[in-house]
Image: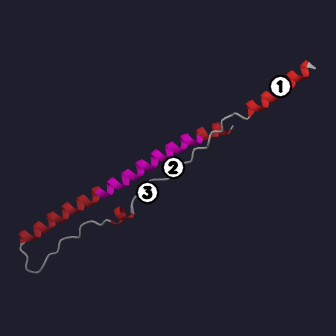
Amino acid sequence: MKPLFLRAGLAGLALLAGGCTTVLPVIPKLVPCEIAAAQLQETCAAPGTIGPDVTYSDVIGVAIADRKNLRLCAEKNRFLVESINACNAAIAEHNKKLDAINSQIAK
């Protein structure tokens, strides 16, 4: 009779211990970088206007200002493109690591 109680006790203990396992959640992936619509709609400076009665010096001044504005616009666009590409690359690498972790957890 004693071995029967011992077996029943061990079986009950095994059932209780089995219910105490920790379930790890699957980590969700990150979303790609989003750029605010206002930043994407920001326009470059308009080219300078040259009226009919301007001097050669005024034309040179407008050309210099246009060149400066165009350079600033190109730098801003290049910065945005590089930022988005770097962010998306980092997120892709992060998601790749999460996939590896999630596949190990699922086993």
To which residue does mark 3 refer? 34
Q: Residue at x 19, y 62 (%)?
A: 67
To which residue does mark 2 refer? 30
In the foreground, 104 or 23: 23
- The region drawn magenta spans 76-99
Using the rendered view, name the quadrant where residue 74 is placed: bottom left
Q: Disc 3 to disc 1, how far (Cα)?
A: 58 Å
Using the rendered view, name the quadrant where residue 2 is placed: top right
Amino acid type, residue under disc 2 in the picture: Leu
In the rendered structure, the answer to whether residue 102 lies left or right of residue 13 reads left
Q: Disc 3 to disc 2, how far (Cα)?
A: 11 Å
Q: Earlier in the sequence, mark 2 or mark 1?
A: 1
Q: Dot 1: few (<14), some (14–19), or many (≥20) neighbours within 10 Å?
A: few
Which x, y percent locates residue 44?
27, 65
Image quadrant where one finds the N terminus: top right
Residue 58 lies in the magenta stretch: no
Q: Which mark lies nearer to you, 3 or 1?
A: 1
Amino acid type, residue under disc 3 in the picture: Glu
Residue 84 lies in the magenta stretch: yes
User: How would you classify the magenta stretch by its main secondary structure?
Assistant: helix
In the foreground, 67 or 86: 86
Q: Are marks 3 and 1 in contact (CB under 8 Å)?
A: no
Q: Dot 2: few (<14), some (14–19), or many (≥20) neighbours within 10 Å?
A: few
Q: Residue at x 74, y 32 (%)?
A: 18
- Circle 1 sits in a helix, a strand or a loop, which is it? helix
Image quadrant where one finds the C terminus: top right
In the foreground, 18 or 50: 18
Which x, y percent locates residue 15?
78, 32
Amino acid type, residue under disc 1 in the picture: Gly
Q: Disc 2 to disc 1, how far (Cα)?
A: 47 Å
To which residue does mark 1 refer? 9
Q: Residue at x 31, y 65 (%)?
A: 42
